[in-house]
Image (cartoon, helix red, strand yellow):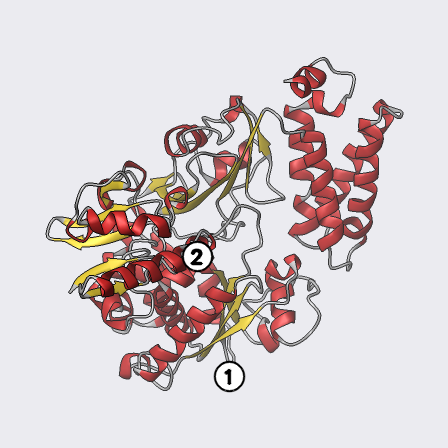
Amino acid sequence: MIRTFVPIDAAALSVGAGRVAKAIAEAAAARGIAIDLVRNGSRGLLWLEPLVEVETPAGRVAYGPVAPADVTGLFDADFLNGGAHALSLGLTEDIPYLKRQERLTFARCGIVDPLSLEDYRAHGGWKGLEKALTLTGAEIVEQVTQSGLRGRGGAGFPTGIKWRTVLNAPADQKYVVCNADEGDSGTFADRMLMEGDPYALIEGMAIAAIAVGATLGFVYIRSEYPHAFRTFSAAIARATEAGLIGASVLGTGPAFHLEARLGAGAYICGEETSLLESLEGKRGLVRFKPPLPAIEGLFGKPTIVNNLVSLATVPVIFEKGWEHYRDFGMGRSRGTLPIQLAGNIKQGGLIERAFGITLRELIEDYGQGTASGRPFRAVQVGGPLGAYFPEALLDTPLDYEAFAAVKGMLGHGGVVVFDDQVDLAEQAKFAMEFCAEESCGKCTPCRIGSTRGAEVIDKIIADEERGNNLVLLADLCTLMLDGSLCALGGLTPYPVLSALTHFPDDFDRTAAARPARAAE
């Protein structure tokens, strides 16, 4: 039978992939053609979804974006054998957007049947875990440390150091917690991996558990991700039933049980201590630190808390070797970063490249400029609390230290593009309003500072004592940076100060640039 692939990823489903799959199945049946219709994950070329692929002797051939009305024409063109058609994109692996990537963490995403254990193993699955089972906990931690892997959730903290702390913490129970509460604007890497390659996360968490002596793990999934939650829960059930995790890892290792938990719908639960509170059944409030979660985490026990991409990358380090992984990247930023390109962009999607690629390459080469066709004006990197960069900073390489030097952050790798119609004063106000809405309320700088910040920006825009209010806004930002209990309040000044620094005209309604842009 001919294998035909139609994604079951949420992004593809949102533009009709389910209807396309149904149309293909019905057309094949009507023509008496036997096909093996695989509902794979997305390749991450989102502007081409639904992306239909067909397995041929030359490789997988892609067609897209496909609508249900296109299916009859595809069959007439013999697409099951790679026939020529207006929607033909040639060999999938040769599509420039995909061919120029360096996929390590997302190497299987879009290729395998997400829930097929056979597919996962056929594409290198469990090899990293098998290698880890031959090592001591200290050796596992050392290899993760040597790889240079840093947290992909935003802070960029060295993963190996966090694991070593948990390893050395004496306790009768330890936990591994995956933070999959992906709430940043323009981000979808966690969702894509859970829906397209869930066993990679399970394998990575099992390695982490073996390393530190944990026997129980939890994956905290964003409440807005029902498809991801269902897929990942099914993956846990299948892996447990097959004896890959549960009473004994791969049938020879220690016990490791894994559970998926649906989040509480609060942005603040993406902060690790608030997430732990939520997992314990409490309100999502930020904890004071110290103690660190690595010492006293879930239920007061030593706990690894890592972002999903960090944990899903671990199997690659053991399958290929830590030296192989460390060879990618620049400076202290080693390996690859899954970048999510979104906003006003022609070709949005997931791009996995080694650290060092520039914003200009992402926006101009991969994204092909703005979707509106209007001139580029700003890009926000790192979610709703990330800095806004102008065209002059587009040659900044994606590197933790390089971004810190220009007062920005990489965050979870979200890149959101804006054309020349964006109002950066309104965007700065949105950052303050967002913080006020999502604050847990535990600390005054975040709870009150964000509310006063939005009010002050309104006064600046209205030219009410503009000079005095600019000074007041700067003071508020300093207070929030230095006095907030967690990163929500502490990072809110980033978009505000970057907008003030790089786009000062937007805060002055009398500036000549404003009416000129508005009139276009």
Pointer 2 local density, CA inside 10 Å: few below 14, some 14–19, many at least 20: some
- Name the residue carrying label 1: 172
Residue at horizontal 83 percent and vertical 38 percent from the top: 455
Q: CA distance from mark 2 to mark 1?
A: 45 Å
Q: Nearer the viewer, mark 2 or mark 1?
A: 2
Q: Residue 453 location, x and y as percent?
A: 79, 40
Q: Which of the numbered marks, if any, corresponds to residue 381?
A: none
Task: Choose between 307 and 50: the one closer to the eye.
Answer: 50
Left or right of residue 273, residue 14 in this image: left
Quarter of the view holding residue 16: bottom left
Q: Residue 25 location, x and y as percent?
A: 29, 63
Left or right of residue 425, residue 39 in this image: left
Query: Is residue 144 visible in this depiction of the protein?
Result: no
Mark 2 near mark 1, Cβ–Cβ under 8 Å? no
Query: Is residue 16 visible in this depiction of the protein?
Result: yes
SS at badge 2: helix
Task: Choose between 310 and 520: the one closer to the eye.
Answer: 520
Q: Quarter holding the N terminus?
A: bottom left
Task: Choose between 289 and 216: the one closer to the eye.
Answer: 216
Q: What amino acid is labelled 1 in the image?
A: Asp
Residue at horizontal 65 percent and vertical 70 percent from the top: 277
Q: What amino acid is labelled 2 in the image?
A: Leu
Q: Residue 412 location, x and y as percent?
A: 50, 49
SS at badge 1: loop
Task: Choose between 118 and 275: the one closer to the eye.
Answer: 118
Q: Which of the numbered marks, if any, corresponds to residue 13?
A: 2
Residue at horizontal 59 percent and vertical 62 percent from the top: 272
